[in-house]
Amino acid sequence: MSLKNKVAIVTGGNSGIGQAIVLELARQGASVVIDYVAHPEATEALEREICKLGNQSLGVEADVSKLADLQKLIDAAVGKFGRLDIMVNNAGIETRTSVLDTTEAQYERVMAINLKSAFFGTQIAARQMIKQGGGGRVINITSVHEDWPMPGNTPYCLAKGGMRMLTRTAGVELAKHDILVVGVGPGAVATPINLSTMNDPAKLAQLNAAIPLGRMARPEEIASVVAFLAGAGASYLTATTIFTDGGIMQSSVGL
């Protein structure tokens, strides 16, 4: 598998799953634009690591809830590397709030970062891919919770459910342009967002018991699926989600 001469953007790319995706795409030969909103030092460290791999990257500070900043990302990719082939809509947050407790501000923030950014990221990236020709890939990092309820985290589930239908509908609409749109739906992943569970032995044991493979995913395991979907081997996949969850959605135990 090789992504040599391909150009990718990864939103929320300097930590967690996004960081692992950036590194894996770079290892496969892609030039990568790393979107971030905080911790520029982490982005710089990531750029240095990619440089050691002999590949190119560019960190861009951009708030993906704003259309102007999404356009800035695409413009940066084209300006630096000449084109855009792979758009990874990865940025996301959660509030861990219920239907009864979620405030308007919490709702709007989750929807703006998780769903609005994915919709317009897909739109703006697709316009560039159509303009330059040759097709492209849009990969949406969703969650098992695009399909599986998680009481106490309602805005997050709602946003991920929206990404599910974005992936399906955009995949159908953009197929005539040879732009493939696929979701990756992780289950529990060992990233900073799950530190409270990972640092609590009882909670971690309960979670691991619910996963047929018996453990959380490593970020690198999600990244390898993204890299596959970005490559030639996934040329007949579109308008669907690949659940990368250790079997938890098929388990009767659940969370």
Image (cartoon, helix red, strand yellow):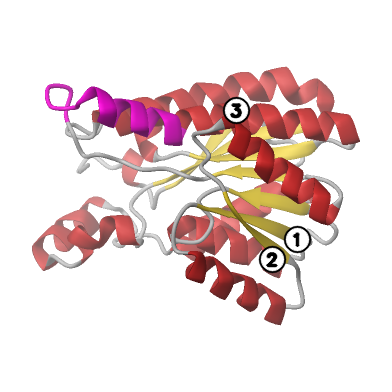
Q: Secondary structure at mark 3?
A: helix
- Residue 100 in magenta? yes
Q: Residue furthest bottom?
A: 52
State the image quarter where residue 167 is shown: top right
Residue 205 in percent (x, y) is at 16, 62
Q: Secondary structure at mark 1?
A: strand
Work out which quarter of the rendered image holds the C terminus and state it.
Answer: top left
Question: Disc 1 residue type?
Answer: Ser
Q: Is residue 128 left or right of residue 144?
A: right
Image mark for residue 26: 2
The stretch in magenta equals 98-114
Tell me the residue at 80%/55% (across/down). 80
Tell me the residue at 78%/39% (across/down). 136
Real-space CA distance between mark 3 and mark 1, rounded to the nearest whole angstrom: 22 Å
Q: Residue furthest left?
A: 202
Question: Disc 2 residue type?
Answer: Ala
- Residue 199 in magenta? no
Residue named by callout 1: 31
Which of marks 3 and 2 precedes in the sequence?
Answer: 2
Residue 72 in percent (x, y) is at 67, 42
Mark 1 and mark 2 in contact? Answer it, CB < 8 Å. Answer: yes
Q: Is residue 148 visible?
A: no
